[in-house]
Amino acid sequence: MNQPIVARQTLALALPKAAPAVATSTVLILGRIWNANGAEHSVGNAALMVVLATGAAAAGAFASAGRRGDSVIAGTAFAASGGLTLAGVAGYADGWSLPLLLWALATAVAYGLAARYWRTDRRESVQYERRTIERRNEHAHIERVEALRAGAQIEVARSGAAYAEALATALVTRAALPGFDPKALENAGLPELPTDQHS
């Protein structure tokens, strides 16, 4: 009954791990399709890819320069430059050896960069889980202390009510005893009974 949920979770966890290989493979396939449609030995197509790859690399260099460098934009620009280079080589080269070599290199670099972000993400997830568990334990402890305090207050109130009830019963029982003389008690210094019990 739980298998579809587990399978979906496994797929959701495995999909990001396959993304670098899927991305570089897609670029390689598109480059080879481009090769089959006339890009091979086309100087104009090669020049276009060189200009685009160089432009993307320059954008990545500018984005990462200085103190205010944006690592996300720089990483995206460098990845685009690498992808354009791989596509250009795959489209321009004669055989499969050089495109496959660049594909393997690009995939290894992509996994190397992705692993760094995965480690950071995992570390942050573990820290968040620890903080959540600590807060949950702290709140559970506070709830237990408050429950004990409330229980103690309830017990004090119950014992006070039981004492008042026992005192009232004792007063009524004392007034009902044969030969009870409230004036003798007053003369002895004992508490006087309420007037409604005299009558």
Image (tube, rainbow, N blue to C red):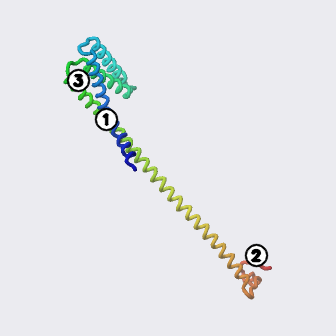
Residue labelled with disc 1: 18
- Amino acid identity at mark 1: Ala
Structural crowding at the residue carrying mark 2, measured as other residues with C-alpha within 10 Å and reported as few (<14), some (14–19) or many (≥20) = few
State the residue at coordinates (20%, 18%): 94
- First in sequence: mark 1 vs mark 3: 1
- Identify whether 44 is placed above or below 20: above
**In the drawing, does residue 178 fall left or right of residue 116?**
right
Residue labelled with disc 2: 194
State the residue at coordinates (66%, 74%): 165
Q: Position of residue 78 (x, y in %)?
A: 32, 24
**In the drawing, does residue 34 fall left or right of residue 181?**
left
Residue labelled with disc 3: 99
Q: Quadrant of residue 56?
A: top left
Q: Identify the secondary structure beneath mark 2.
A: loop
Q: Nearer the viewer, mark 1 or mark 2?
A: 1
- Amino acid identity at mark 3: Pro
- First in sequence: mark 1 vs mark 2: 1
Q: Identify the secondary structure beneath mark 3.
A: helix
Q: What is the distance, in whole Å, between disc 2 and disc 3 at their CAs?
A: 108 Å
Q: What is the distance, in whole Å, between disc 1 and disc 2 at their CAs?
A: 89 Å
